[in-house]
Amino acid sequence: MICTTNEERDIMLLGSLVTLSSCIPKIYGIYDGKRVYPNLYLFISAQASAGKGRLVHCKQLVKPIHKALRQQARLIKQQYEIDLADYNSKEGKAAGVENRKSPKKNVIHPANNSTTGVFQLLSDNDGRGLIFETEGDTLAQAFKSDYGNYSDGFRKAFHHETISYYRRTDREYVDIESPALSTVLTGTPQQISSLIPNAENGLFSRFIFYFMNVQPIWKNVFASPVSQGLDAYFDELGQEFYELYNSLLSSSETEFCFSQEQQIQFNTFFSQVQNKYITIQGLDYMATVRRLGLIAFRLAMVLSVLRIPETGELPAQIICDEQDFQIVIEMIKVLVKHSGKVFSELPSDLKPTKRKNRKEKFLEQLPKTFNRQKYLETAASLSIPNKTAEGYITEFVKKV
């Protein structure tokens, strides 16, 4: 085992699944009538020294793919420079070479970037990528800056909505269709508040949240869970996933779906979760519950793809394994609680007090028990005619 506590196991599982979700090509599912891909957003929240730093090893799972794409970009650039030199020597006879730009191929995109820079990287990589930052406020600071506020595009990418931007250098209007971005962030609770300033921000409901507790126990820093060390261990896993990635890349598109029975269980489960948490957290939390449904579907998609090497076959349609379906449901039972904790600790915006109308003031001033004489006296104090007050009472009674 590479982890010594249940919390470490949780965050390493979540971090691995979300990291891998960035590199699963040609797999899709239909959710709420829309085509969706496996990509997920994750934020691990904990105080300093709680142990969240181990999550950084998850990045190594896609490192071989990242390196291969960077090498591909270098070869493209070298060929471009050869073609450009040839173009210049022929004085314009090889038209079009000077307009071709060398793309930046990679998996991992830096969060500390300009808006155009982030969108350019996504465009160069067919709308795909991974933002992986061990300090959540790196992304928060980018969103707060004038040059790096790509929060709108970041939110759109979660639902694969088209991102449009303008490149002034080339005077070119660019559309990134169906962006598929994954994100892994770690940080303190204060960094969450910096990234997501209020509970009504649409960014909150797009994230999987996991809150770690600080364990006041000294850890044996010399004990190694694997003989070769964690770096070598995760590098080996990365190579295994690289083979699966290439297999998916060379195959046709594959649809992921739930069985009919799983669909019924899924809808029943989330209906119950929604009713429960609307009562506990209010309507503002409903978006989180509904997006957790999409997150559950995507988690099941990732787990199903990881089972492909067991059979060595990639069917035209993948029906979720029942074991994976139940695993995801159990995960959501835990994650909805963690999201609820983070949600309840977010600062609320100060909203102007809504001005009450005559009917609301009348209802508010009525005692718990009253007769006709009492409610007419209350109405008179508010200059409400008797007939109007009688109409209000009749309406209130009907709604009880």
Image: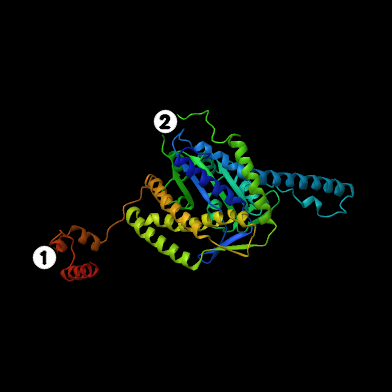
Judge by depth and name the residue closer to the eye, 77 or 223: 223
Question: Is residue 110 at least partly visible in the picture?
Answer: no
Q: Residue 387: percent from the left, percent from the top?
A: 17, 71
What is the secondary structure assignment of the residue under circle 1? loop
Q: Residue at x 84, y 55 (%)?
A: 95
Q: Amino acid at mark 2?
A: Ile
On screen, residue 297 above or below 14 = below
Q: Residue 198: percent from the left, percent from the top?
A: 42, 47
On screen, residue 14 above or below 161 = above
Judge by depth and name the residue closer to the eye, 222 or 289: 222
Which of the 4 image quadrants contains residue 229? top right
Left or right position of 358 against 291: left
Colour scheme shown: rainbow
Judge by depth and name the residue closer to the eye, 102 or 386: 102
Q: Residue at x 11, y 67 (%)?
A: 372
View extreme (right): residue: 90
Q: Amino acid at mark 1?
A: Asn
What is the secondary structure assignment of the residue under circle 2? loop
Determine which residue is flagged by label 1: 371
Q: Residue at x 19, y 65 (%)?
A: 384
Q: Residue at x 34, y 51 (%)?
A: 352
Q: Which mark is residue 217?
A: 2
Q: Residue 341: percent from the left, percent from the top?
A: 38, 46
Left or right position of 395 against 202: left
